[in-house]
Image (tube, helix red, strand yellow):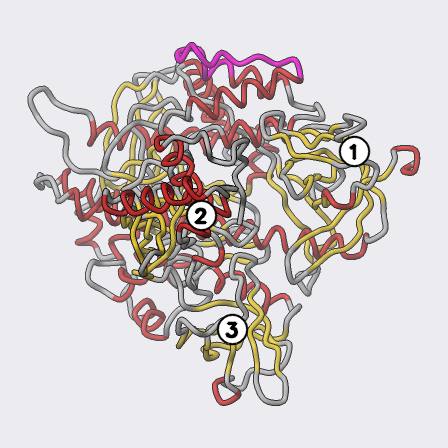
Amino acid sequence: MSKLNSTSKAKGDNKKSLIGKVISAFAENRGAQYNYKQMAKLLNISDDATRKLLNKTMTELAESGELEEVSRGKFRQKVKAAYIEGIVDITSSGSAYIVSEQCDQDVYVAANNLNHALPGDTVRVYVYSRRGHKSVEGEVVDIIKRKRTTFVGTIEVSKNFAFLIPDRAHMPFDIFIPLDKLNKAKNKQKAVVKITEWTERQKNPIGEVVEVLGVAGQNNTEMHAILAEYGLPYNFPERVETAANNIDGEITNEEIARRRDFRNITTFTIDPADAKDFDDALSFQRLDNGNVQVGVHIADVTHYVRPNTVLESEAYNRATSVYLVDRVVPMLPECLSNDLCSLRPDEEKLCFSAVFELDNEANLINEWFGRTVIKSNRRFSYEEAQAVIETGEGDLKDEILELNRLAQLLRKERFTNGSISFERAEVKFILDENARPVGVYTKENKESNKLIEEFMLLANKRVATFIGKKEPGKKPNTFVYRIHDQPNPDKLMAFASFIRKFGHQLQVKNKSKLAKSINTLLTEVRGHAEQTVVETLAVRSMAKAEYSTKNVGHYGLGFEYYTHFTSPIRRYPDMMVHRLLAHYLDGGKSVDSTVYESMCKHSSEMEQLAASAERASIKYKQVEFMKDNVGRIFEGVVSGVTQWGIYVEVKENRCEGMVSIRSLTDDFYEYDENEFAVIGHRNKKRYTLGDTVFIRVLSADMEKKQLNFEMVNGEDAK
């Protein structure tokens, strides 16, 4: 209970002053109940006259609705409140913020007022209107919808009961499991547990094991646990596999007759060396007028996966393939993704194609979209195609060299028109036969990668433009776009402020020059200590790309119209695009945008889950790789700062760990959000983004997927 200072013993207090003090006292002690004697003590009022006035004042405040009388002579603040619905976002401290469209700011909820609400839950919140406070606070009164009821973790079994210790830090409760609900799960095994009961009086939820994943620490167990954690499947139901295996893959003469025939035109694929699903191919033909006809041929997945089938339902639910460090979890069963729909060499394949006529300067002269049949002449890996580009020798050298020349012209034009060059290095692992990481390297995109990229971008852009561009007096047909909105101005300003510390500038006020300014910056930082940090913050200052029927363009690419047409084997939105394009080419009317917007939202959400799972698998392998390096000292770069720790990325292998603020014993350090730094209170020493530091690996926590570092003196590292 807090006391309010009073220089007077209330003799000189008038009624107006007394009202203000009473209201402030109740606001300071929200929820507390006082009679006039208790309030007098709180306000240091001792004389009888003012105590009588206080009693009268509190009664009048209750009559006016400012206070409420909860029992005879006892009052509390009458809280002006509202009920809202929103999504729970739990912080590392256990408290939460409720994000709601019904409130112009996030509502703070203390941990003891969450009432069993968990991250992502949709809840009903009682919101207090707090006098004299800018922030709003509330209490969860109802859980409308659980984000999830199943959790992944490690089983702990004792004599009379068992618990699941969740993997996820944001699940703050262990789940109690009766012994008869273990479903054969054993101590220290990883499992999936479903919450079955959680009453108000129970601190911990009660659950049952629904799936045993295996022994903790084994690679398959951990990868399956990551997928289960994000609600992603790792195998196909038997009925789906059966449906896929029963597809008749014969290409009849009648089907070929309905398509444009490219079987006699030079065609090839370029993919990663270990790829099994080849969903795009390029064809090349020199025309009599000297121009080049380039065909972008995409596997015709929707020919095989039909609406209202179990295959369609499974593809929609998954929405995307998931690429973990050691495996691909495909959107479609392998007999489709790696066989029927894979554009393998010397096999006739059905495609949906975008065909372009380009002149010598890569200007678009003509285009055509439709269903085709192809026969690939050659399968190249990126390395093989790169060797042709670098040496000028090898299979199909004339075709590859000319396509590379045209791709470079397309790329140059794209950047001239505002495309941003985000080319962050991709971390890859060398795995042994047991999937243990024995090496780490960064994947570099060379000309062969960029060749394919430019023609895929061209196809995606032109398909979207073909459908989306408004004809005078007509409303464009409903379509699925890949959109990327304008950057958030506040994030841009913060980013510009940060990079000035390194001597870099960003033209944030001139929208027409912003993209060029970002490209200049990304070029300037290459090879410098701050490169990774600047690239990361540049990406974070941008909006997130997503799927929508509401086209706002693609800012990062500088395209007014853009979609995803080129990867239907691994992305459900591309299947939607194929179906819509075919529908409109056949003269169909515009479809219901509400239905497709809902499908777009689902696809965007699944894409985010898949990306989170992919990052988790990388983090797990980084920790596993560094497990044998505990005690070693490495040079690193500060990649993030928070109020609880400094994140450092090791230069040698790009593995990231955290130095706890509490481990910095030479001073008391505080986090400065505006400076992107933690700063010593006495010595003013600072650790900020981009700083080069030396760290010692303290521990590699496999369960938490976390590396713990400590700072060391540069001299100690020598």
Question: Left of 542 or right of it: where is 5?
Answer: right
Compared with 696, 319 (above or below) is below
Q: Sequence-wise, which precedes: disc 1 or disc 3?
A: 3
Mark 1 near mark 3, Cβ–Cβ under 8 Å? no
Placement of 289 over or under 31, stated as above or below: above
Q: Which residues are magenta?
A: 502-517
Answer with mark 2 or mark 1, whichever residue precedes in sequence.
2
Q: Residues within 10 Å of mark 1 (few under 14, many from 20)?
A: some
Identify the residue under disc 1: 693
- Say whether residue 509 is magenta: yes
In magenta segment, residue 592: no
Give the number of marks: 3
Q: Which quarter of the image is occupied by the C terminus?
A: top right
93, above or below 260, in the image: below
Q: Does residue 79 appear left or right of residue 425 in this picture? A: left
Disc 3, SS: strand
Amino acid type, callout 1: Val
> Which marked residue is nearer to the observer: mark 1 or mark 3?
3
Is label 3 in contact with label 2 (beta carbons under 8 Å)? Answer: no
The residues bearing labels 2 and 1 have C-alpha atoms spaced at a distance of: 56 Å
Residue 116: give x, y in percent of width and height. Answer: 43, 64
Residue 618 at x, y percent in the picture: 61, 51
Q: On screen, 356 above or below 652?
A: above
Q: Residues within 10 Å of mark 3 (few under 14, many from 20)?
A: many
Q: At 25% from the left edge and 45% from the top edge, which residue is drawn?
A: 65
Foreground tag (2 vs 1): 2
Q: Secondary structure at mark 1?
A: strand
Residue shown at 38%/18% (left/top)? 362
Query: Is residue 402 or residue 561 the one in the foreground?
Result: 561
